[in-house]
């Protein structure tokens, strides 16, 4: 089969690799019909080389049709249309019983000190082959796959794999009071959906970004916007819009590669230039993130407010403004999305023909799987108005 594979910094290719096969009785094989590029895939493209091997298959936002299941998989069968959550969880361990699926004790990558295994995401999270491929082996398929109805296009359901539950959790964790305000920093795919979900739930939403196409997309969905490239001081603009207090809640949907952190950016770049055996321990114990978005969140939230972090951070020695956090009484909530925890909330919205979350207005580019290298470059450089790119594998089903 064809699959998108990592070969080095800013070097992804489409290679011929062996077809996946059932290995465990609770496995399934999925023929992938759509698979998206996530903003966190760009961290692999740019930064995380020390934790990934040449030839590893990327991607963690797939959906498709069940081709084969192991004997312990009974809730889906060949021919079913399914979405695959990005994290791999068993559904029955101690943490899964608490609906903390991103911390599943069955798939935790203990040798790395990490939570549940993820598709297509480095040795840190299990080095499980990803979903940017024609076929995908799905471990723990007795629980993970989400069955969806036939009929509507893939984009109606595809974002249940990551974007929608990540955004729903970010808004839930933000704990916006009734009739309150939330500022969303970063209007990439996650930020767009955070803003729309918060609006759907009746909150006032202020979206912040510096990319014109992202700001325009947010405005189409009723979001007040702040252009970070023009506002000068984003914090001051948000304070002005909220009567001087700050937003009740702030969602950081940017993460560790935020603009406006030149020193940390230089440190990240220097680390990626080191040989992998030197870079990996350095990143694991002393990594430094670009924290400008997070600092803006701390400044822009009101006293006693909540900051919800959905953007990915990886540093182990990031300086935190503890005096400010303590003095303002800020609550922090964060973490990988517990995908299946939020599906019952989201499914009625994505199956509603009125499309209340605008899931059909998120994909800006749909390209064949073979064009993945160009797609990664376009997304990383924010060219051609790229906000969300979906890849389409094209191989016919096996006979």
Image (cartoon, rainbow, N blue to C red):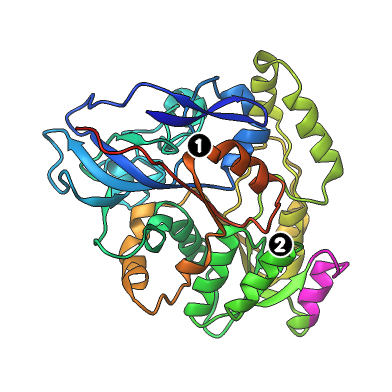
Q: Earlier in the sequence, mark 2 or mark 1?
A: 2
Q: Mark yes or no: residue 9 visible.
A: yes
- Please, what secondary structure does the residue beneath circle 2 have? helix
Q: Is residue 257 left or right of residue 125?
A: right
* 232 drawn magenta: yes
Q: Which residue is mark 1?
A: 370
Q: Is residue 144 left or right of residue 228?
A: left
Name the residue rendered at 43%, 77% in the picture.
Answer: 356
Image position, residue 197 (x, y; %): 49, 72
Q: Quadrant of the C terminus?
A: top left
Q: Quadrant of the N terminus?
A: top left
The span shown in magenta is: 228-240
- Please, what secondary structure does the residue beneath circle 1 have? helix
Q: Eyeballing the image, is 357 above or below 286? A: below
> Callout 1: 10 Å neighbours few (<14), some, many (20+)?
some
Image position, residue 173 (x, y; %): 51, 63
């Amino acid at each position: 089969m064809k699959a998108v594979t990592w070969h080095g910094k800013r070097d992804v290719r489409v290679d011929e690799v062996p077809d996946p096969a059932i290995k465990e009785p609770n496995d399934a094989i999925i023929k992938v019909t759509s698979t998206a590029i996530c903003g966190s895939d760009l961290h692999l493209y740019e930064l995380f080389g020390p934790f990934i091997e040449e030839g590893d298959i990327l991607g963690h936002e797939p959906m498709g049709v069940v081709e084969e299941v192991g004997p312990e998989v009974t809730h889906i069968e060949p021919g079913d249309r399914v979405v695959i959550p990005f994290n791999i969880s068993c559904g029955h361990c101690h943490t899964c019983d608490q609906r903390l699926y991103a911390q599943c004790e069955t798939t935790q990558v203990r040798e790395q000190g990490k939570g549940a295994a993820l598709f297509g995401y480095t040795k840190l999270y299990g080095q499980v082959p990803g979903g940017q491929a024609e076929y995908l082996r799905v471990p723990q398929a007795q629980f993970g796959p989400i069955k969806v109805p036939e009929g509507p296009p893939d984009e109606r359901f595809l974002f249940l794999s990551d974007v929608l539950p990540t955004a729903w959790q970010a808004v839930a964790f933000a704990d916006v009071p009734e009739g309150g305000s939330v500022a969303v920093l970063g209007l990439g795919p996650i930020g767009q959906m955070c803003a729309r979900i918060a609006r759907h739930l009746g909150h006032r939403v202020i979206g912040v970004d510096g990319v014109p196409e992202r700001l325009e997309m947010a405005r189409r969905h009723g979001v007040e916007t702040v252009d970070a490239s023009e506002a000068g001081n984003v914090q001051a603009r948000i304070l002005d819009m909220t009567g001087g207090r700050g937003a009740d809640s702030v969602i950081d949907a940017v993460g560790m590669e935020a603009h406006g952190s030149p020193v940390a950016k230089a440190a990240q770049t220097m680390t990626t230039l080191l040989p992998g055996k030197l870079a990996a321990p350095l990143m694991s114990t002393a990594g430094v993130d670009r924290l400008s978005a997070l600092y803006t969140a701390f400044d822009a939230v009101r006293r006693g407010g909540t900051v919800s972090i959905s953007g990915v951070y990886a540093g182990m020695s990031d300086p935190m403004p503890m005096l400010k956090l303590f003095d303002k009484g800020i609550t922090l909530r964060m973490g990988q999305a517990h995908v299946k925890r939020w599906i019952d909330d989201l499914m009625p919205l994505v199956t509603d023909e009125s499309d209340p979350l605008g899931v059909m207005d998120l994909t800006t580019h749909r390209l064949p799987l073979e064009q993945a290298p160009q797609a990664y470059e376009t997304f990383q450089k924010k060219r051609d108005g790229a906000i969300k790119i979906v890849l389409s594998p094209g191989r016919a089903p096996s006979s």
